[in-house]
Image (cartoon, rainbow, N blue to C red):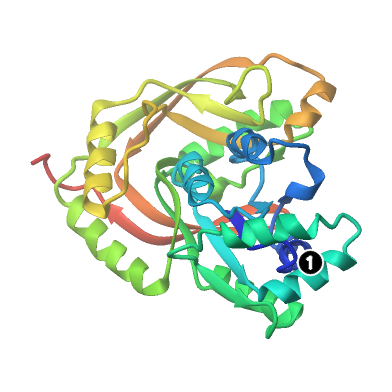
Amino acid sequence: MIIIFCGIPGSGKTTIAKRLVEHLRKQGSVKHFISDELKPPVYKKFFQILPENLGKYDFLIFDATFYKKEWREKMKQLAKGEKLLMIYLECPLQIAIQRNKKRRAGIPEEAVHIMAANFEKPDRADVVIDTQKTAVSESVKKIMNYIKIKKRVFVAIGLSQSLQSKILEWERKFRNLPVRWLAGKNLHITLIPPWYAEEKEIEKIKKILNSIGGVIKPFEIKFEKVAFGPAPRQPRLIWAEGAVPGELIKLKTRIEKMLGQKPEKRPFFLHLTLARFRPEDFKSFPRQILNEKVEWKEEAQSFVLMESRLSRLGADYEVLRVEKLSGGLT
């Protein structure tokens, strides 16, 4: 999840964001980027930082005034479908000026007036907090409540017990690698990347998926090698690769259309994540090249709606719905 704080200087962004980080670390990995700690041009750097860090952390927090709408819109574009939570902090100008004077890195009062005068208020902020009336603890609670009512869901193809066992047996040869191997039940092929949905939305999603399974026939999936991915120079995964079956693309396209999900711009790449690790740890690996041939086959007889639950130990997955493939393409 990407979290953006916006508001005039002195509205309380960094104070609340730092307290929020403490709570979010109980659920997963967090990276907090503060505009005051970056040299100009701050937003140009944010536009580089966001795509570079997508997928590396469970929560990315960007803390700045974001007083121009175009900057906020640019961040949404760079999020590439990842859930972006916009938090707008309201604060009377005189209160903000008083707070700014007390800060070690306070900016000139004239700059506060200029930003306040030119501030383009968000039309659809996810969370709006009046920091004059709301304590820091209550502000964090309000944000956490918003995050908790949303479930991080995605559509995938699960693996049979037989293939899970075969993969786990293969992994024993590489147990010396300092990585976090996925449990057998967590192994899956992602069809539709994660997005956030409320409980009532999930019930609608289940009904839509139920209408799809009956018109798609089962098909075979083959994995041919295991390698480091996704970027050869700075990998963070161990995954299995294979050719993309035409039936899989048809299934993915139909689900995207029925759910109203925007197709990814890049071509679909068939992969199965086996393990995760921090890119900065790669230099210490006993081996820098991984190109293991495998012959793993799976008969895709169903697809699933899964929930991704974040914790300090990483993501854990729960199946919310299983839809069998039983029909013929229409």
Q: Name the spot of residue 330 as percent of width and height, x first.
A: 8, 41
> Farthest residue in the front direction?
110
x%, y% of residue 2?
A: 58, 52
Residue at image location 81% in from the left, 22% down from the top: 283
Examine the rendered structure and indicate whether residue 298 appears above or below residue 88.
above
Q: In the visual, does 246 lie left or right of 299?
A: left
Residue 159, compared with residue 84, is above or below; it is above
Nearest the camera: 318 or 172? 318
Furthest residue to the bottom? 133
* In-image side of 104 versus 16 (left or right): right
Asked whether residue 240 appears in the rendered view, the answer is yes
The x, y position of residue 208, in whole percent, is 23, 60
Mark 1, residue position: 15
Name the residue rendered at 37%, 20% in the picture: 243
For the N terminus, which image quadrant?
bottom right
Front residue of 201 and 330: 201
